[in-house]
Image (spheres, grey):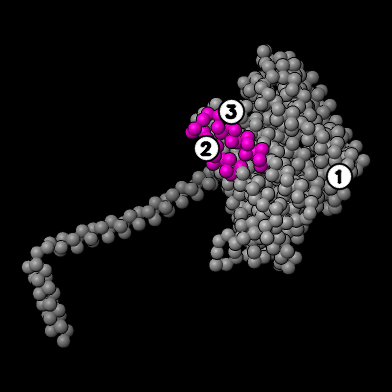
């Protein structure tokens, strides 16, 4: 029986999907139609997500129907609502609404806005499919639709070659991980005899270690690629070529967050594979600190925030590796609020000064007071300064590592504390170079209300969630952990301030500015191998094509020869029959 909460969750997925279709149709009829449809659809989606969350308190609910016969393990079409899916659903709905409103103010009237807003709606529907689906294969469908949407949205300005290259890079690098994810789903599904998530998790205790380890490792490959973790991280900063709303959506609430959500949903399987968690922890430790150092050297505000996203996701995966699924999810929620705020603020600044390069910014606090105030809240949350949401959630992540056991937990703790200090430094540097110092672009004014409205709305949870969690007792912060984290964060803030005072336009060493030369390394090692392999595949394909074409040509020539015998002359046919009879008679006489 389909309960009301399941029906609401289904509608939450369908509403943005319908908005995508109607938005494209409305674009042909009226210029303002796509904006109305997009914002209305996002509002309905957000309201439905809140209703789902309010009804999820009664406990998990799940319903499904057979989707298609397979001759083997059936695929089901259904939804599951629990605390995880309900919470993440609200996060996706709220951020998607803010992004659609912001997009209406930023891009309405521009070429291809109708397709842009429709793709954002489809992107939202795909993420909610991942969140609410009860079947792993349907999760994979939503996962892939997000990949296609990200490719199209990042490459929205397809007339710009670097933008097209960034979109293609994101598509190809995430596809590498998606292959692993698909095989991982198949391994776990075959071992469990079902692709339903609850059935797979129920079967995990009875599985042999091999399928659990292989399945989780393959899923980890997909998660690492989708969430921009080392070594498949370099596509994420390049994705900044897309418009600011795309960055906010991808980096805050949908695509990169999907990896964390999937690991949390399958967490019992990961707990049964400690080797997988160790691998995930080592990759997270490398990612969180390496990306933070890269952010310290970035000269573009959006790239600073992009590397910051990679680093913060590393913290979440580190918490998962240390056994803290709740801490990882809490930081995911806080990060969605303050990172969406920061990306939209960066977009507002870019509109005002005509670009996102830090060299063009400075002194903007006077001309853009609303953007300055809201971005300051976002930067404070990113730096984990009290009493923001980032302070509380970040301390929860570090607390899990603090009390963890084993070498991986120790490595994660050290990396997390160093990352906290480096984060404080690059946040201070970016904030000061954007809003302090002399004015580099005179005459800069605040952006319209449609752009500042979402900033104010997102600043409320970025600041208020931390206060709410602490005052209500929903989250407890260990005093020693809080003091230690705050000390490292303040040390980074002071270092960033002193560095800015000494050299406001400080240029980072090349090793940081190029993010440790990861792309150059790939160009020298992986790209030639892939190109040679592709050349051989093309040659093999040409050989197969030549064989097929040769067979067709031979059949055509044979048919042409036989056609010569079809003259329509009865005398010719009788002569042929008599000649055949004569040959048979001669053959019988000779052999007989």
Secondary structure at numbered mark 2: helix
In the rendered image, residue 18, in percent from the top left (x then y), is placed at: 57, 43
In the rendered image, residue 229, in percent from the top left (x then y), is placed at: 68, 44
Please name the predominant secondary structure of the magenta segment in the image: helix
Residue 307 can be seen, yes or no: no
**Number of callouts in the render?**
3
The C terminus - image quarter = bottom left
Secondary structure at numbered mark 1: loop
**Relative to 407, residue 465 above or below:** above
Secondary structure at numbered mark 3: helix
Q: Of the two numbered discs 2 and 1 on the same chain, state the one appearing first in sequence.
A: 2
Label placed on residue 24: 2
Label placed on residue 517: none
Residue sitting at x 64%, y 48%: 11
Circle 1 is placed at which residue position?
A: 474
Q: Nearer the viewer, mark 3 or mark 2?
A: 2
The span from disc 2 to disc 1 (Cα, nearest Å) is 43 Å
Circle 3 is placed at which residue position?
A: 107
The magenta-colored residue range is 16-45
Residue 580 can be seen, yes or no: yes
Q: Of the two numbered discs 3 and 2 on the same chain, state the one appearing first in sequence.
A: 2
Name of the residue lying farthest toward the right: 479
Residue sitting at x 68%, y 34%: 98
**Quadrant of residue 513 within the rendered picture:** top right
**Relative to 417, residue 133 above or below:** below
The span from disc 3 to disc 1 (Cα, nearest Å) is 39 Å
Q: Residues within 10 Å of mark 2 (few under 14, many from 20)?
A: many
Q: Of the two numbered discs 3 and 1 on the same chain, state the one appearing first in sequence.
A: 3
Q: Are marks 2 and 1 in contact (CB under 8 Å)?
A: no
């Amino acid at each position: 029986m389909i309960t009301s909460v399941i029906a609401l969750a289904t509608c939450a997925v369908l509403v943005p999907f319908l908005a995508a279709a109607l938005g494209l149709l409305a674009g042909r009829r009226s210029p303002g139609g796509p904006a109305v449809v997009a914002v209305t659809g996002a509002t309905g989606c957000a309201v439905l997500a809140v209703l789902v969350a309010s009804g999820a308190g009664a406990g998990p609910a799940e319903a499904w129907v057979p989707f298609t016969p397979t001759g083997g393990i059936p695929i089901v079409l259904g939804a599951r609502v629990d605390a995880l899916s309900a919470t993440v659903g609200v996060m996706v709905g709220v951020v998607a609404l803010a992004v659609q409103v912001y997009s209406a103010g930023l891009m309405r009237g521009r070429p291809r806005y109708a397709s842009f807003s429709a793709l954002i709606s489809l992107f939202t529907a795909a993420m909610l499919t991942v969140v609410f689906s009860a079947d792993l294969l349907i999760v994979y469908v939503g996962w892939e639709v997000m990949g296609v949407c990200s490719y199209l949205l990042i490459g929205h300005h397809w007339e710009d070659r670097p933008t097209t290259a960034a979109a293609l890079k994101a598509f190809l690098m995430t596809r590498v991980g998606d292959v692993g994810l698909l095989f991982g789903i198949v391994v776990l599904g075959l071992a469990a005899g079902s692709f339903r998530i609850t059935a797979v998790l129920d079967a995990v205790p009875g599985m042999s270690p091999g399928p659990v380890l292989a399945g989780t490792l393959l899923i980890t490959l997909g998660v690492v690629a989708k969430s921009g973790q080392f070594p498949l991280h370099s596509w994420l900063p390049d994705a900044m070529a897309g418009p600011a709303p795309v960055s906010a959506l991808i980096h805050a609430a949908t695509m990169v967050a999907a990896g964390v959500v999937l690991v949390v949903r399958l967490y019992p399987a990961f707990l049964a594979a400690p080797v997988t968690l160790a691998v995930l922890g080592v990759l997270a430790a490398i990612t969180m600190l390496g990306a933070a150092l890269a952010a310290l050297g970035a000269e573009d505000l959006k790239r600073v925030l992009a590397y910051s996203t990679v680093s913060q996701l590393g913290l979440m995966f580190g918490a998962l590796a240390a056994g803290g699924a709740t801490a990882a999810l809490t930081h995911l929620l806080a990060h969605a609020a303050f990172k969406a705020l920061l990306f939209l603020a960066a977009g507002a600044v870019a509109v005002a000064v005509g670009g996102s390069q830090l060299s063009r910014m400075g002194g903007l606090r006077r001309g853009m007071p609303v953007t300055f105030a809201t971005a300051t809240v976002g930067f404070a949350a990113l730096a984990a300064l009290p009493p923001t949401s980032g302070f509380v959630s970040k301390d929860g992540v570090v607390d899990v590592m603090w009390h963890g056991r084993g070498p991986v937990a120790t490595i994660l703790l050290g990396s997390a504390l160093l990352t906290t200090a480096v984060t404080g430094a690059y946040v201070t540097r970016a904030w000061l170079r954007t809003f302090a110092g002399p004015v580099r672009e005179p005459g800069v004014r605040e952006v319209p209300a449609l752009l500042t409205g979402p900033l104010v709305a997102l600043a409320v949870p970025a600041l208020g969630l931390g206060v709410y969690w602490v005052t209500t007792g929903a989250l407890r912060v260990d005093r020693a952990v809080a003091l230690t984290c705050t000390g490292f964060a303040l040390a980074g803030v002071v270092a960033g301030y002193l560095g800015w005072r000494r050299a406001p336009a400080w240029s980072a060493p090349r090793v940081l500015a190029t993010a440790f030369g990861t792309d150059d390394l790939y160009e020298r090692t992986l790209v030639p191998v892939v190109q040679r392999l592709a050349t051989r595949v093309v040659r093999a394909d040409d050989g197969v094509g030549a064989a097929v074409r040769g067979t067709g040509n031979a059949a055509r020539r044979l048919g042409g020869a036989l056609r010569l015998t079809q003259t329509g002359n009865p005398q010719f046919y009788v002569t042929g029959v008599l000649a055949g009879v004569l040959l048979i008679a001669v053959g019988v006489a000779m052999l007989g």
